[in-house]
Image: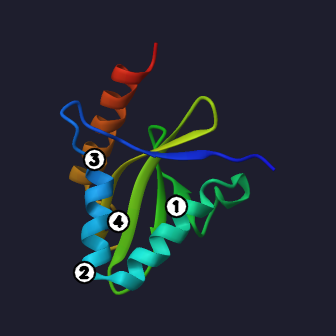
Amino acid sequence: MIEFTVEFYVTADGQCPVRDFLLELKASAPGDFAAVAAGLERLRHRQCHREPLTKALNDGLFELRHVGKLNTRVLWFFMKGRRIVTVHGIRNKSRAIPARDLDTARARMRDWKERNEP
């Protein structure tokens, strides 16, 4: 079975926005946190890289989705070596991901690649 590693984006100054998002989620909505944590674990397995758990967005970004009273999403991208890098987490009521959140995810993906690719 093909397995992937799931990593968290870390800013140049050592911040880890997805970890912080998950810690806040764990405190405010433990059930949603458990579902998202289980989803992140499932991302390690290639057969889970499709709907309803994940969905391709654009520009190489994907979302891990958990539907509840508030929709919880973790945005991520693939890297060489069977790696998944999570870059942004959001909660909202709508089905659409706000443009500012997509912009944040894209900027973090660019930053990660600039600092981590040869």
On screen, 84 above or below 28?
Answer: above
Q: Secondary structure at mark 4?
A: loop
Q: Quadrant of residue 112?
A: top left
The residues tagged by marks 4 and 2 sit, at their Cα atoms, a distance apart of 22 Å
Q: What residue is disc 4 on?
A: 96
Label drawn at residue 28: 2
Amino acid of disc 4: Ala
Estimate the x, y position of residue 85 in percent, counting from the top left.
Answer: 46, 42
Residue depth check, mark 4 versus mark 3: number of the one nearer the observer: 3
- State which tag comes first along the sequence, 4 or 3: 3
Report which residue position mark 1 lands on.
40
| Residue 109 pos. (x, y %) | 36, 35
- Looking at marks 1 and 3 on the same chain, the residue that comes earlier in the sequence is marked by 3
Looking at the image, tell me whether mark 4 or mark 1 is earlier in sequence order. Answer: 1
Q: Which mark is residue 16?
A: 3
C-alpha span from label 1 to label 3: 16 Å
Residue type at mark 2 is Ser
Mark 3 is surrounded, within 10 Å at the Cα level, by few (under 14), some (14 to 19) or many (20 or more) other residues, namely some
Of all residues shown, which one is farthest toward the right? 1
Say whether residue 39 is left or right of residue 76.
right
Q: Position of residue 57 (x, y in %)?
A: 47, 50
Of residues 86 and 14, the one drawn nearer to the viewer in this rendering? 14
The amino acid type, in three-letter code, at marker 1 is Leu
70 or 96, which lies in front? 70
Image height check: is 22 above or below 4?
Answer: below
Q: CA distance from mark 4 to mark 1?
A: 21 Å
